[in-house]
Image (cartoon, rainbow, N blue to C red):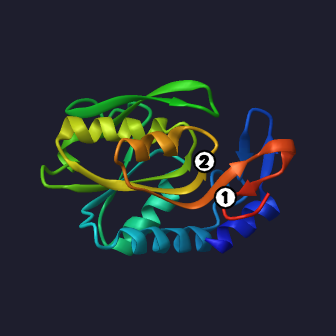
Amino acid sequence: MRELVDLIKKSGKVLPGNVLKVDSFLNHQVNPVLMQHCGEELARRFKDSGVTRVWTVESSGIAPALMTALALGVPMIFARKHKSLTLTDDLYTADVYSYTKRVTNHISIAKRFVQSDDKILLVDDFLANGQAVSGMMEIAKQAGVQVVGAGIVIEKSFQPGGHNLRKAGVRVESLAKVKSLADGKVSFEEEKA
């Protein structure tokens, strides 16, 4: 998606540890027009998959997941990382390790928002090691629902997440595929080195 790639080139910053900082438009300050376009593109790619719900993990996946759900005309559910007074029991849960925060989160989705015939599209802002998607897939397995695929805004294809998910038979659609962050420069799969 050219608009996204151009914005990453313009505003993305490479930090130590293979971290791509895009907090000016994706995961702190959110560019709503870009998120609308990302959601429309992910919806276009999965429109024939019979999606009944879009799932994500709070909080950075919410914006693209919401816009994808809006474009598909289905509800969006975000897996919560923290317990609340209103989310206490009858939950599907999984543990998810955050690469950038270096913590393990216990994510939860309330059983009452999951139907046995659901076809789930998983959406997230980043795919690096695949932990968030794998955690949501674990919840889907517990719930006995079908995952039709994963829609990703930015995939770091030099890390194993995308490869491992595809090898496991998961359809992964990424709007921008970063092939390297070497020497502080972002290069994309569609570009020549």
Between 107 and 156, which is closer to the camera in this rendering?
156
Number of marks in the image? 2
Between 124 and 30, which is closer to the camera in this rendering?
124
- Residue 30 image position (x, y, % from top left): 63, 61
Helix, strand or loop at disc 2? loop
| Residue closest to the far front | 192
- Name the residue rendered at 12%, 49% in the picture: 116
- Residue 65 image position (x, y, % from top left): 44, 59
- Which mark, residue 157? 2
- Name the residue rendered at 73%, 61% in the picture: 8
- Residue 46 image position (x, y, % from top left): 36, 68
- Which mark, residue 127? none
Whether residue 118 sits left or right of residue 128 in the image: it is: left
State which quarter of the image contains the C terminus: bottom right
Helix, strand or loop at disc 1? loop
State which quarter of the image contains the N terminus: bottom right
Which residue matches tag 1? 189
Looking at the image, is 98 positioned above or below residue 76?
above
- Name the residue rendered at 58%, 41% in the picture: 128
Instruction: Examine the rendering and report whether any part of residue 86 can be seen.
Output: no
| Residue closest to the far left | 116
The CA span between labels 2 and 1 is 8 Å
Whether residue 1 sits left or right of residue 186 in the image: it is: left
Mark 2 residue type: Ser
| Circle 1 Cα neighbour tier, 10 Å, few/some/many (<14 / 14–19 / ≥20) | some
Looking at the image, is 72 positioned above or below residue 188?
below
* First of labels 2, 1 by sequence position: 2
Instruction: Examine the rendering and report whether any part of residue 28 can be seen.
Output: yes
Q: Are marks 2 and 1 in contact (CB under 8 Å)?
A: yes
